[in-house]
Amino acid sequence: MIDQAKTVSLVMATTTVYEHNPAIPLRVFVDRTEAEQWRDTLIDYHLSRPEIPFSSDDKGEWQYYEAQLAEWRDGHPAGATASHYRQFSIYEIPQGL
């Protein structure tokens, strides 16, 4: 069992749209509660993703969506690369590794 007093909390992006992409480390926290809050921020951000205009054949509408999506990715709290991931997890890591 890991001694919680001697660990840090690592937030990782763990699931991607593209299955071949590996999980990526995002940020380390000394306080687990802060890690959980930041992870929740990432999850909440994903709920604000622009909606795909599935039923539209309008090229302008799709271009507008693509511009919104690019802006959304650029504004991602963990960076544009993390915007491609769908799950964010916290791992307890022993300090000093």
Image: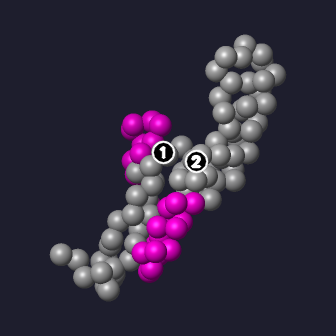
Q: Which mark is on residue 86? A: 1
Contact between labelled residues 1 and 2, with CB atoms less than 8 Å apart: yes
Residue 72: percent from left, percent from top: 69, 46
Can you name the residue that lies furthest to the top here?
A: 57
Can you name the residue that lies furthest to the right here?
A: 60
Q: Quadrant of the N terminus?
A: bottom left
Drawn side of residue 96 relative to residue 25, left or right: left
Magenta-span inclusion, residue 69: no
Q: Quadrant of residue 92?
A: bottom left
The residue type indicated by label 2 comes to: His
Question: Label 2, on which residue?
Answer: 46
Q: Which residue appears at 64% of the width and 42% of the height? A: 49
Can you name the residue that lies furthest to the left here?
A: 1
Q: Which residue appears at 47% of the width and 70% of the height? A: 35
Q: Which segment did they paint magenta?
A: 15-41
The residue type indicated by label 1 comes to: Arg
Q: Element type at marker 1?
A: strand
Q: Element type at marker 2?
A: helix
Drawn side of residue 40 relative to residue 89, left or right: right
What is the count of numbered marks? 2
Residue 24: percent from left, percent from top: 44, 55
Question: Please, is residue 20 above or below residue 87 in the view?
Answer: above
Magenta-span inclusion, residue 25: yes
Mark 2–mark 1 distance (CA, rounded to whole Å): 8 Å
Dot 2, how many residues are within 10 Å of its Cα: few (below 14), some (14-19), or many (20+)?
Answer: some
Q: Quadrant of residue 3?
A: bottom left
Which badge, 2 or 1, comes first in the chain's sequence?
2
Dot 1, how many residues are within 10 Å of its Cα: few (below 14), some (14-19), or many (20+)?
Answer: some
Q: Quadrant of the C terminus?
A: bottom left
Residue 95: percent from left, percent from top: 33, 81
Drawn side of residue 32 relative to residue 42, left or right: left
Q: Is residue 24 visible?
A: no
